[in-house]
Structure formats: structure tokens, C-alpha cells
Image (cartoon, helix red, strand yellow):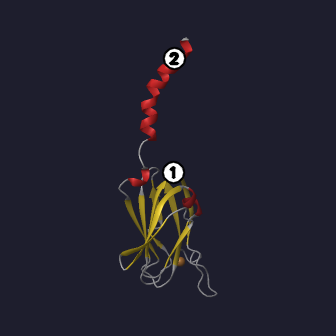
Amino acid sequence: MRTAVAAIICFVIASPLIAAYAAGDLTRQKPIEVVVELGTKDGEMRFVPDQLEFETGKLYKLVLVNPSPHKHYFTSPTLASKVFTRKVDVRYDGKRIAEIRGNIAEIEVFPGGQSEWWFVPVSTGTFSDLHCHVKEDGGPSHQDMGMVGTIRIR
Ligand SMILES: [Cu+2]
């Protein structure tokens, strides 16, 4: 009997805490905007910036713009495995023309294009697998030419 009473008291004390942790849709926060340029106007092979930092539990709108004359990928298998994706918006001439849902592995952005990856990081880590694996005809890959970056989730 004493155990049962103790269990009920524990449940009554703990249940508001459980409710507080379970409530709320993390994908409906106001997003934190982070802009990354894939390549540069004059054709340099790099991400600008090439060091990104995110925090678990916050909603991000990662804006991927390509101001360069080349197509580029934003690929980081580790980032893809550590976030919950709400959606990807694809824009043309500033207008949203498509919304994609589900798990995202990588995003390719064409010259002058823009895509926005909305996600909530769910686990932490520092990893340097951000890269672009496009290869110009017979030449080295963009990654080999310096198109790499590091991502930290804290
Ligand atoms: Cu590239």
C-alpha cells in the first residue's frame, strides 16, 4: 500500500514535467536563417561560409544560393542523418515554385538558383563531410578544388 501511494505521488509530481517536455511542435518555430553561397560569382570552388554551426532543437532555414556559373551540390551525409527535415522550398526568380517533404540526402542548385532547406537538428557533433562532388569534364571534382566545409551541431 505504501508503495502504491508513493507511486501515485511520484506520478502526480512528474506528470507536469512530462507534459512540458512533450508539448510543442519544434518545426513550427520562427526559423533562424543561414545563407550559404555555393561557389562564387567569379567561379571559385568554395562554400561561403565554409564553417556552419547549428543548435539542436531550433528550426533553421538553410538558404542555398548559387551565384556562380557552375552547378553545385550541398552534400553532407552526417548533417542529413542528424536533422529532422520539415521541407525544402525551391525558388525561381524569387518565387517559390516547389515544396519538397521527406528525408533529404543532398541538394543540387543550378546557376542562379536558390533552395531553402528547413530542418531541426536532433543530435550533436562536428564533421567535415560537407562537399560538392560535381566533376567538370575530365577534370578534378569541385571537392578536390576546395569545395568542402565543416559543420558543428551543439
Ligand atoms: Cu560544385
Instruction: Name the secondary structure under disc 2.
Output: helix
The image position of residue 72, as x and y in percent, is 52, 77
Cβ of mark 2 under 8 A from ligand 1: no
Q: Are marks 1 and 2 in contact (CB under 8 Å)?
A: no
- Please name the residue shown 52% across and 56% down the image: 83
The image position of residue 111, as x and y in percent, is 46, 82
Instruction: Name the secondary structure under disc 1.
Output: loop
Q: Which residue is mark 1?
A: 122
Q: Is residue 14 above or below residue 132?
A: above
The disc, 1 or 2, on the residue closer to the chain's N-terminal end is 2
The image position of residue 61, as x and y in percent, is 41, 62
Foreground label between 1 and 2:
2
Number of residues whose C-alpha sits closer than 10 Å to that of mark 1, classed few (under 14), some (14–19) or many (20 or more): some
Which amino acid type is shown beneath numbered disc 2?
Ala
Number of residues whose C-alpha sits closer than 10 Å to that of mark 2, classed few (under 14), some (14–19) or many (20 or more): few
Instruction: Using residue 31 as the reference point, say whether residue 149 is left or right of it.
Output: right
39 vs 97, nearest the viewer: 97
Which amino acid type is shown beneath numbered disc 1?
Val
Q: Is residue 114 above or below residue 13?
A: below
Q: Which residue is mark 2?
A: 6
75 vs 92, nearest the viewer: 92
Question: In which quadrant of the rendered image does the N terminus lie?
Answer: top right
Q: Is residue 44 above or below residue 126?
A: below
95 vs 71, nearest the viewer: 95
Q: Is residue 109 above or below residue 33?
A: below
The image position of residue 33, as x and y in percent, is 37, 62
Cα distance in 3D space between marks 1 and 2: 35 Å
Instruction: Using residue 17 as the reference point, say whether residue 78 is left or right of it.
Output: right
